[in-house]
Image (cartoon, grey):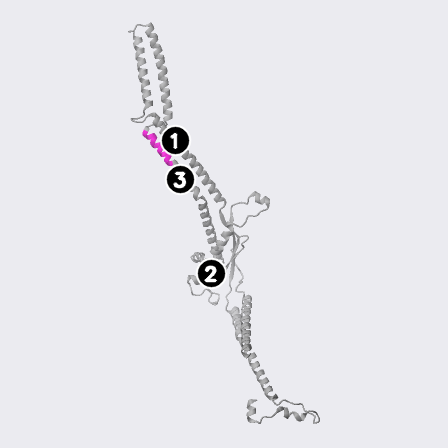
Amino acid sequence: MGQLAQHKPRVNKARAFAPLAPAQGPDLGYDEDFDDRLDQMLSAAHRRGARHWGLMLSFAAWVVAPLVIATWYFLTQAAPQYASHVGFVVRSEDMQSPLSMLGGLADLPGSEAADAAILNNFVQSQDILLRVAQVQDLSVAFNSEQDPVFSLGHDQRIEALLSHWKRRVTVYLDTQSGMIEVRVIAFDAAAARAIATQIFDESARLVNQLSQQAREDATRFSKAEAERAFDRLRKARQALLAFQARVQIIDPRADIRGQMAVLQSLQSKLVNARVDLALLQENQRPNASKLAQAMAETAVLNQMIQQERDRLGQVGAEEGYADVLAEFEALSIEREFAETTYLAAQAAHDAALAEAQRKTRYLARYLGPTIAETAEYPKSGLWLLGLAAVLLGSWGICAVGFYAMRDRRRF
C-alpha cells in the first residue's frame, strides 16, 4: 500500500464512501485517520503471519526432521539385538533357629543382603569386565557394521569399554530377598548367553572368595591359639625326653618303686639271716662252719642294703633321687598341662571351624542363562516415543521463551 501511495494522491477513504450514506441522514463523523489505523492493522497481521510461518518451520526442523531421520534409522539401519537373562541369589548353609520359626519371626537381612550389594557393584565394575574380556571377544559381541549408534565402535580403551558395558549389562537387585537378575544384550544370541554365563561364574568365584575370607577371619584366633598350644606341648615333651636321656631313667617313680622293693626284700633276708646267726651263736661253737657262713651272709646283706640305699640317695655324679624326682614331676606336670591346653584349643578351633562352615555362603542360580530366539532390542517404539517427547518439550520451551522475551521488549 505504501507503493500505491507514491503513485496516487492520498484519498480519504471515509469521504470516498460518504456519498453512499443517505443524503438526509445526519453526519456520521468519520475519523480522518481511519486509513492510517487500517494500514497498521494490516501490517500487524502480516507480521503475525510471518511469525506463524517461522514457528512452523522451526517445528519442522526441530521436531519433525529428527523424528523422520530416527524412524529411517530404526527401520533400515538398526541391527537386531538379543538379550540373555541369568538370575542368582546368595545363600548360606546356616539354618533358621526353631525358636524363630515357632515365633513366626523371619531372619533380618544380614550378610546375604550385603553380599548381594557387593555383587551388584561387582557386575558393573571394571574387574569383571577384564575377566570376561579374557574369555569372550567383546568387540565382536558389541559391534555391528550396519549399526554405528548402538555399537561399541573402534575405541578399545578401558573407559569406553566400561561405559558401553554398563549400557549393555543391566543388574536388577531385590534388596528385600537379595535376588539378582542380570540382563546382557549383544548383537548375537550365543554371545549374549556366553557373557551371562561368564558373569555368573565370576560372581560365584567372588562369593567363594568372600566366604573363604570370612571363614579364615572367624577361625584365625582359634587357629593361632591351637598353634601356640601345640608348640607348648611340643616343647614340654622335648624337655621331658631330654631329661630322660640325661638321667637314663624313663620313669623315676617306677624306678624308685622297684628299688624300694629290692631294698625291702634285702632287709627281709637280712632279718632272717640275723635270726639264724643268733640261733647258731647260742647253739653252736664260735668256730663252727655254719656260724661263719651265717656271719658272711649277714655281712653281704648289709653291704647290699647299703649299696641300695646309696643308690637311692644319689643318681649319677651330682644328682640325687630327690632332685631327679622333683624335676621329673615338674616336667610331667608341664606336659600334662600342655596336653590339656592343646586339647581345649583344638576343640575350640574345631568348633569355630564348624560354625564358619555352617555359615558358608554360596551362589544359587534360579534362572538361565537364557538364549534368545527373537530379537527384543532395540525397542524402536519406545525410542521414538521418548525422542518425540524430548524434542517436542524442548521446542515448546524454546517457543514459549521466545514469545515471552518478545512481549517483554514490546512493553
Mark sitting on residue 228: 3
Task: Give the prevailing secondary structure in the magenta stretch.
Answer: helix
Q: In the picture provided, is 246 more to the left or to the right than 202? A: left
Determine the image quadrant of residue 305: top left
Distance in Å between CA atoms under marks 1 and 2: 68 Å
- Dot 1: what SS? helix
Query: Counting other residues with Cα less than 10 Å from the Cα at mark 3, is it few (<14), some (14-19), or many (20 or more)?
Result: some
Amino acid identity at mark 1:
Ser
Q: Which mark sits nearer the N-terminus, 1 or 2?
A: 2
Distance in Å between CA atoms under marks 3 and 2: 50 Å
Q: Residue at x 35, y 8 (%)?
A: 279
Q: In the picture provided, is 184 more to the left or to the right than 243? A: right
Quadrant assignment for the N terminus: bottom right
Query: Counting other residues with Cα less than 10 Å from the Cα at mark 2, is it few (<14), some (14-19), or many (20 or more)?
Result: many
Q: Depth check: 357 or 309 in front?
A: 309
Residue beneath label 1, please? 332
Distance in Å between CA atoms under marks 1 and 3: 19 Å
Mark sitting on residue 165: 2
Magenta stretch, residue numbers? 234-246
Q: Which mark sits nearer the N-terminus, 1 or 3?
A: 3
